[in-house]
Amino acid sequence: MSRAARVIVATYNQLALFRKALRGYLRQTTTDFALTIADDGSSDGTKAYIEEIRPAFEAKGIPFAYVWQRDDGFRKTRILNEAVREAEDEPLLVFSDGDCVPPASFVAKHIDVHEPWSFHVGGCYRLSREDSEALTEADIDAGRHETLGTAEHEKDLRKRRRKSHWGVRFRRKNRPKILGLNFAADRQLFDSLNGFDERFTSWGIGEDSDLRDRAMRHRPRARVKNLYLENDVYHLWHPVGEGGGRKKQWDYYKSPRPVRCERGLVDESQ
């Protein structure tokens, strides 16, 4: 039976954080969703943990899937597209990362605002190293992570919400603000864009900004749902990895990319 949404959580060799993130999906206020883990080649025990926690989701009636690919550098776009290809026909796709713990109402709020051709953007509370390391799985089960937002976090989210609102209204470039760790897209819109552009092969600027740009250039234009301050995840602290940044992708990102990417859900580059 198809659900209202498919939640896709991307991960790569962050098992300690990933364990905490998944606990958040076990306490959602709705079970009208399916969950797919999109693994870009983890070799840290993530596969074994998937089998350990799968029964907990099945007991709640939440369909649970796992897609993995060989580690060959940053290929997040490819594994996310594969997760969508292997999904059922859920009308809404919700994307997050394996270092982010959702609030209990996270999936329900994305479902509530969904409509045809909608594109949802939300934010995150960037937790400190101290708070992240002190947070246990039991804390998450009890919802204690939802008390860790600060006034500074809210100030940042308010700024992103304002920029997204006015930027969309006046059709400015690079708006709405988007974070790849919390956004959603109507399934038909995502298919029309041909999914993520697999030419993006590093983090820093890439797959999320590109998808946003193409959604806003699409005709009909995407209907933006601005969820900053309303539906934000809790991002766990971790050291910043190597191999990303703007420079590696900047030339391609600034090029005249087509609305429907050539190398996406379907490879149309030949």
Image (cartoon, rainbow, N blue to C red):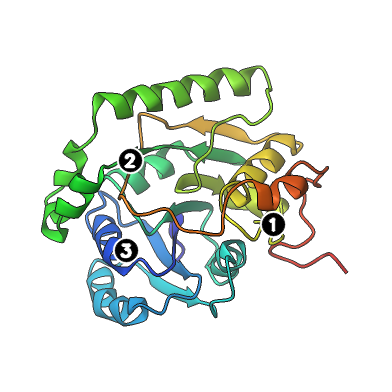
Select label 1 or label 2 by which is in front.
2
Question: Percent from the top left, x then y, of residue 45?
Answer: 32, 79
Question: Percent from the top left, x then y, of residue 46?
Answer: 35, 76
Q: Regarding mark 3 in the picture, which secondary structure is present there?
A: helix
Q: Write down the quadrant of residue 16 in the picture.
A: bottom left
Residue at image coords 76%, 36%? 219
The residue beneath circle 1 is 197
Residue at image coords 35%, 66%? 14
Gap between marks 1 and 2 measured at Cα: 27 Å
Q: Which mark identifies residue 18?
A: 3
Q: Is residue 17 left or right of residue 163?
A: left
Are dots 3 and 2 in contact, CB under 8 Å? Answer: no
The residue beneath circle 2 is 126
Are dots 1 and 3 in contact, CB under 8 Å? Answer: no
Question: Percent from the top left, x then y, of residue 218?
Answer: 74, 39
Q: Nearer the viewer, residue 62 or 44?
A: 44
